[in-house]
Image: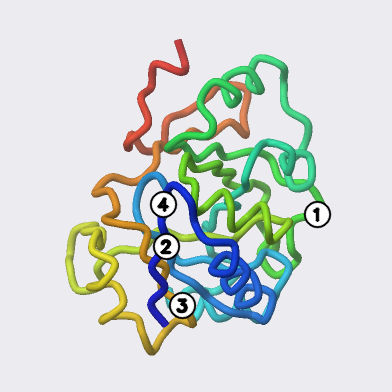
Amino acid sequence: MLLRLNYDNPHPKDIQLIVDCLKNDGVIIYPTDTVYSIGCDITRPKAIEKVCRLKNIKPEKANFSFVCSDLSHLSNYARPISNSLFRIMKKALPGPYTFILEANNNVPKLLKQNKKTVGIRVPDNTICKTIITELGNPIITTSLHNPYDEILDYFTDPEAIYREYEKKVDMVIDGGFGNLYASTVIDCSQDELVVLREGLGSLDILD
């Protein structure tokens, strides 16, 4: 199913349709403030397994992000962070960043095997934030890229995404053209912050 949404004012009925899909083990492709992503409800193990099969990876090997509507979910899945790190995250989010933090015991067991960290995202995207707010918990997410390209070539056209994935996922959400650049990834799990990938997000937040 291809569902077109108004970016500035997504219709509540459309949002509810997406939420119902996620609550019923559905897998969606949806827009963020960077690239289009594949996602599912963090509380649905069957859906997480579907995403892993789609990406051809084992759950314990997956480096999925937890996409949240704001920082209120932080303590649910990550260990306490320093005040200085919280200030950086507060300045950066919502925005095109992924922060790698120490995971706590609430991370789904399916994902936590041998993993001590979790990636937290709060995209600056109205559709994305509205879906997560109505769902009531984060979406497990992995970036969508063109599987036929040797380099990391991200899909930007929702209709092209739908043609490729209509039989592989339950819903593709059209929120307009996506970005070509992924999020900036910062590892905050150790004493010193380490930039793992410089993406759309400026590193000025670290100054």
Q: Position of residue 95 (x, y in %)?
A: 46, 34
Q: Residue at x 57, y 71 (%)?
A: 18
Which amino acid, mark 3?
Met
Q: Which secondary structure lies at badge 4?
A: loop
Q: Total number of numbered labels?
A: 4
Estimate the x, y position of residue 115 in percent, counting from the top left. Answer: 65, 55
Label 1 sits on a secondary structure element that is loop
Q: Secondary structure at mark 2?
A: loop
Disc 3 secondary structure class: strand
> Considering only vertical position in the picture, is 138 above or below 53?
above
Relative height, residue 26 to residue 103 (above, below): below
Q: Label 3: which residue?
A: 171
Q: Amino acid at mark 2?
A: Leu
Question: Residue 190 versus residue 167: which sits nearer the camera?
Answer: 167
Name the residue that disc number 2 marks. 5
User: Which numbered dot is residue 7?
Assistant: 4
